[in-house]
Image: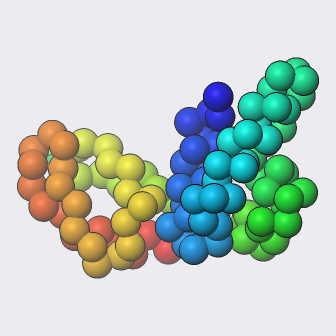
């Protein structure tokens, strides 16, 4: 199974329109095969090898993964990488609606 971080990486790639779900399925298959061969292949390398992403796109996604954490005023940590700035999210803890800031 792909790691949590791999899944996140892929979700960002989809959100940004770099890949579609069909490519995603193929990617999961390739990742599983790599694991069966005891080769731990990272999703970013694999996507470059498969020419799904350019190295620039990979960097863009990795930058986003590092910026995805946002704290609600109540202290709850939120994963906001699938949201665009200006969208609204509900805090799991205090239930307040939060405007997603521009995290760039
Ligand atoms: Zn909150």
Task: Let me know if residue 65 appears in the view.
Answer: no
Q: What residue is at 38 percent from the left and 50 percent from the top?
A: 79
Q: Is residue 95 above or below residue 84?
A: above
Relative placement, left or right, of 29 versus 77 is right
Q: Is residue 30 above or below residue 23?
A: above
Q: Is residue 1 above or below residue 102?
A: above
Please identify the quarter of the rendering in which residue 93 is found.
Answer: top left
**Quadrant (top left, top right, bottom left, bottom right) of the N terminus:** top right
Task: Let me know if residue 84 appears in the view.
Answer: yes
User: Residue 78's spot in the image, x, y percent?
Assistant: 32, 48
Q: How many marks?
A: 0
Relative placement, left or right, of 3 versus 81 is right
User: Residue 100's spot in the image, x, y percent?
Assistant: 29, 68
User: Residue 62's spot in the image, x, y percent?
Assistant: 66, 58
Q: What residue is at 10 percent from the left and 44 percent from the top?
A: 94
Please identify the quarter of the rendering in which residue 87 is found.
Answer: bottom left
Q: How is the image coloured?
A: rainbow
- Give the camera-side residue of 8 and 103: 8
Q: What residue is at 72 percent from the left and 71 percent from the top?
A: 57
Please identify the quarter of the rendering in which residue 41 is found.
Answer: top right
Q: Is residue 4 above or below residue 68?
A: above
């Amino acid at each position: 199974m792909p790691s949590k971080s791999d899944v996140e990486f892929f979700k960002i790639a989809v959100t940004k329109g770099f890949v579609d779900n069909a490519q995603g399925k193929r990617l999961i298959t390739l990742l599983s095969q790599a694991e069966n061969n005891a080769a731990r292949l990272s999703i970013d390398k694999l996507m470059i090898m498969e020419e799904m992403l350019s190295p620039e796109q990979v960097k863009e996604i990795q930058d986003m993964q590092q910026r995805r954490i946002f704290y609600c005023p109540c202290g709850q940590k939120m994963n906001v990488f699938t949201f665009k700035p200006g969208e609204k999210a509900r805090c799991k803890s205090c239930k307040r609606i939060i405007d997603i800031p521009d995290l760039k």
